[in-house]
Image (cartoon, rainbow, N blue to C red):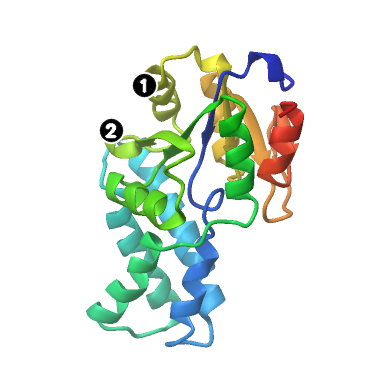
Amino acid sequence: MSFDPDAVETIAFDSYGTVVDVTAVEEPLSEYTDRAEDVSKLWRERSLQYAMVGNAIEEYDSFYAMNRHAFRYALDEVGVDLDEDEREDVLSTYHELPVFDDVREGMERLHEAGYDLYIVSNGSEDMLESMVEHGDLGDFLTDTVSADEVEQFKPDAGLYRHAAEKIGVPIENVGFVAAGWWDVPGAIHAGMQGVWINRQDTLWGPYETDPDLTIETFGDLADELGV
């Protein structure tokens, strides 16, 4: 399916890596190690793996709790020794991650054009609340949808379908925007129009399904929608 701008009634965004920059954890990490980038990458990868395994074995814990476990794993693997207070201090960065430069302007254009905007995220409800508040995004967003609501993580179809039900529009009328190479295929499989924002200049695949639309900024999406 190719992107159909006329069919898009509502736009949903992933959060971490799409709206806010998870690599910002490298700054507080750099106070403790010169391998902050290595820890950050392994931490992120492991947290996503935990979510996918949780889906597969039908076990659920909040993403923040899994993020804590993933962080400890990454520190151990790289050989960085932090005490519990230091780990919690770095982990709390997830409540204050910076918004990518293109996000507010792009959301403002879409909001002013009449689109309802949502966040659909694996993040726990308190994480999303702090992200919206810290990022000053409340004026643009209608609501957030957390994995906590269904105890199921993306890319399982359940969270995308729950989001469409909560939003109240047919799932094919939701444009879903994410940077995750794993997230957009999940949304397409569930029935949404999948928009891949390639923030890391990486490769897509290896899937038979391509993104319905590939963009570099939120402004590109506004352009595609003619607003």
Residue 134 lies in quadrant: bottom left
Q: Residue at x 51, y 16 (%)?
A: 171
Would you say residue 202 is visible in this rendering?
yes
Q: Residue at x 56, y 75 (%)?
A: 37
Amino acid type at circle 2 is Glu
Where residue 215 appears, x then y in whole percent? 73, 41
Q: Say the numbered circle drawn on residue 54.
A: none
Tell which of 49 and 140 is nearer to you.
140
Where residue 129 appears, x then y in whole percent? 33, 48
Q: Say the numbered circle drawn on residue 166.
A: 1
Q: Does residue 168 lie above or below 199 as drawn? A: above
Badge 1 vs badge 2, beta-carbon distance below 8 Å:
yes
Sequence-earlier tag: 1 or 2: 2
Q: In what quadrant of the picture does the N terminus appear?
A: top right
Tell which of 12 and 211 is nearer to you.
12
Residue 223 lies in quadrant: top right
Secondary structure category for the residue under label 1: helix
Q: Say the numbered circle drawn on residue 149.
A: 2
